Amino acid sequence: MAIEKNYGNPQLEEKLRDRYFYTDDSNPEFLANVEKIGRTIAHMCFQCGTCTGSCPSAPRSSYRIRLFVRRAVLGLEDEALTDPDLWLCTTCYSCTDRCPRDIAPTDIIMAMRNLAFKRDIVPRNFLKTAQLIYTTGHGVPNNDVNRAAREKLGLTRDPPTTHGYPEFIPGIQKILDYYKLKENADRILAEEGQ
Ligand code: SF4
Ligand code: SF4
């Protein structure tokens, strides 16, 4: 809800009415939750933009890590967790290496993803990737095109991963079962008829 105040200044009142976010949009616990899960100090951000300037995803998308850090500070939970850009971070940690305030923006994103998952807000391709990791040990399993290319390069048809050692797949499944990742991925996709 907008803050309506009479300042006796029509221009200022108009500006305030045009604000995109309002105090009611803010969850004061959001910053504390993000900092606790991410074990970082988002509130120290002074919006210098070094993180966005270091981010390989930024030039190719509308994703701006600095915006997400700001959302954390302002408690804008819904805006952050429902924005599909949340899932465009590659977790390369360039921003974390370069932040002059020693904040870990990457871990802010990871914390927000955790909070989003708790509310079942996860892109479907991520859920399908979780299913593939559970069954094959790979987010992108090998295929015949890759096998032929590997053979041409003098490599084994399958890499020395769970493709070559499927006996390790149950270990991966045990980890994912502990966090109920596959179970929740199956449930969310089933609820959506996918
Ligand atoms: S680099 Fe650090 S201080 Fe600068 S905007 Fe990003 S998170 Fe904030
Ligand atoms: S960790 Fe994520 S947000 Fe940070 S620079 Fe890499 S892709 Fe961008």
Image (cartoon, rainbow, N blue to C red):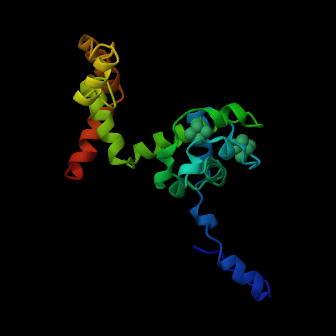
The location of residue 29, given as percent across then percent down, is 59, 48
The location of residue 6, given as percent across then percent down, is 74, 84
Residue 104 seen: no
Taking the spot 58% from the left edge, 41% from the top edge, the residue there is: 56
Taking the spot 46% from the left edge, 53% from the top edge, the residue there is: 84
Report the side of 1 relative to 41 (left or right): left
Q: Nearer the viewer, residue 133 or 148?
A: 148
Q: In this picture, is 25 found above or below 137?
A: below
Q: Nearer the viewer, residue 174 or 36?
A: 174
Q: Count every numbered label the image shows and give the total.
A: 0
Q: In this picture, is 139 found above or below 119?
A: above
Residue 76 seen: yes
The location of residue 122, given as percent across then percent down, is 38, 47
Taking the spot 73% from the left edge, 82% from the top edge, the residue there is: 13
Report the side of 141 relative to 7 (left or right): left
Quadrant housing residue 32: top right
Q: Quadrant of the N terminus?
A: bottom right
Residue most toward the right?
8
Split into quadrants, the picture shows ligand 1 in the one at top right
Taking the spot 52% from the left edge, 41% from the top edge, the residue there is: 89
